Amino acid sequence: MAENPDLEGLMRRALAGDKAAYTELLRETARLLRPYFSKRLSFESEVDDLLQETLISIHKARHTYDGHRPYKPWVYAIAKFRLQDFLRVHYADQLRHAQELSGQESDQQDDVTVTGISYESISAEVEKLPEKQAAIVRLLHHDGYTAREVAEKLGMSESAVKVAAHRAYKILRQTLER
Amino acid sequence: MKDMDKLLAELAEDAASVRPAPHPYWLGLKLAAAGLAYLALLLAASGFRADLAAAASHPLYLAELTVLALIFFATALSGALLAFPDLHQKRMLALAPAGMFALLWLVILLAWQADHPPAPLPVHSYQCTLSIAGVALPPAMWTLLALRRYASTHYYWTGGVAVLSAFSLGALWLRLHEVNDSIRHVIEWHYLPMIAAGMLGVWLGKLLLRW
């Protein structure tokens, strides 16, 4: 592969329907954007998600590029746009979790990370929980991580982990009482 | 999320040849031409103000009309540029409406200072705002729908500029149609509502131009 591929030329060929050129262009674009997102996001999984979302956006918006002006400003404009969207949703989620937590504070008399039942005895029920909740319960009670460590591991806030754990316990309690 | 290679293969598979969007100058020109044709139809239906010849002898009235027309052209062009993710790499040109609005406020300021003794206020008030809004509705809609076909990364601004473009057309029509020389009335019921409409356009942009 060339050191500095002619991205404008590749895009011109892609717009004319050249699939090979388009694949190469998208691959080069992903290579270009990965460090841009990595610098701004903490988790590799988020970088991957955002990168793929940006490539889809580039695909949708490719008719707005004519191949006669520099490609990079066009592609970075889309990348920045998607990054801002992502961060907006991310922070809105965090805010919502925080609000939910403060709403539930009065209900939470027990420590959400401590239960009287062993993990092994309910592991089958845990696996039936939604994926994220199951992972949190597993990490807390099987692997012995603290809520803060789970939060770091899953890229969530500590309060969001506690809320998810609390919900998981609620579901488990209902299931086990049946 | 899918595996990256799988995604690239899927996107490449869907990569039939596409027709590039028109150049924003051409798009802006088309929007402006549609707006002017609409204005001509409106004036043909409603007629010009009866004292147009006398009014046209006032330089500030002519300046106001000129600046309104410039705002209309600048917003049409800016909307077209803003519809492209990278503003077609002509960022300064996309900001042209700001300069035109500054010019409008300057003309208004001069007209305000020259308004001695103050021209009598017309008997009507909010009816002007309603007329402008009614006239501006079709161009606002067609402009927003036209810009929706592209990929704006500044959808708030694009929406605001599109609605301002339509309202400037409405304001231009009313200044050519209504017999009125009160600058106070014009500020209060023509131009301030136009700014409010621009803010509504920001919200419409979020609603209609997000992709």
Image (cartoon, coloured by chain):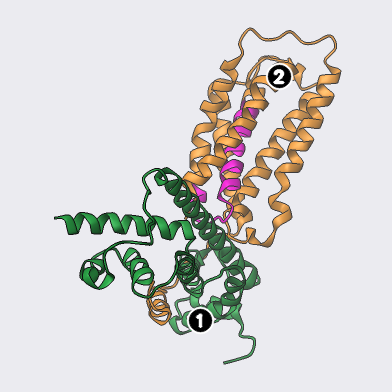
Chain colours: A green, B orange
Neighbours of disc 1 within 10 Å: few (<14), some (14-19), many (20+): some
Residue in front for this viewpoint, A131 or B87: A131
Q: Which residue is drawn at 80% across and 10% down?
A: B118
The three-letter amino acid code for the residue at tag 2 is Leu
Q: For residue A144, which quarter of the picture?
A: bottom left
Q: The C terminus of chain A is located in which quarter?
A: bottom left
Q: Residue furthest bottom?
A: A1
Q: Looking at the picture, how far across and down is residue B102, in whole percent? A: 77, 37
- Residue denoted by label 2: B52
Disc 1 element: helix
Q: Residue at x 43, y 49 (%)?
A: A101
The three-letter amino acid code for the residue at tag 1 is Arg
Q: Is residue B150 magenta?
A: yes
Q: In the image, is residue A75 above or below residue B109?
A: below
- Residue denoted by label 1: A27
Disc 2 element: helix
Q: In this view, does B26 lie to the left or right of A118?
A: right
Please report the bounds of the magenta region as a residue range: B145-173
Q: Subunit of mark 2?
A: B
Q: Does the magenta stretch include residue A143?
A: no
Q: In this view, does B184 lie to the left or right of A135?
A: right
Magenta stretch, overall SS: helix
Residue in front for this viewpoint, A151 or B17: A151
Q: Looking at the picture, how far across and down is residue B185, in whole percent? A: 69, 16
Q: Residue at x 56, y 44 (%)?
A: B159
Residue B136 can be seen in this image: yes
Q: Looking at the picture, how far across and down is residue B164, in whole percent? A: 61, 37
Q: Is residue A116 left or right of residue B141?
A: left
Residue B36 can be seen in this image: no
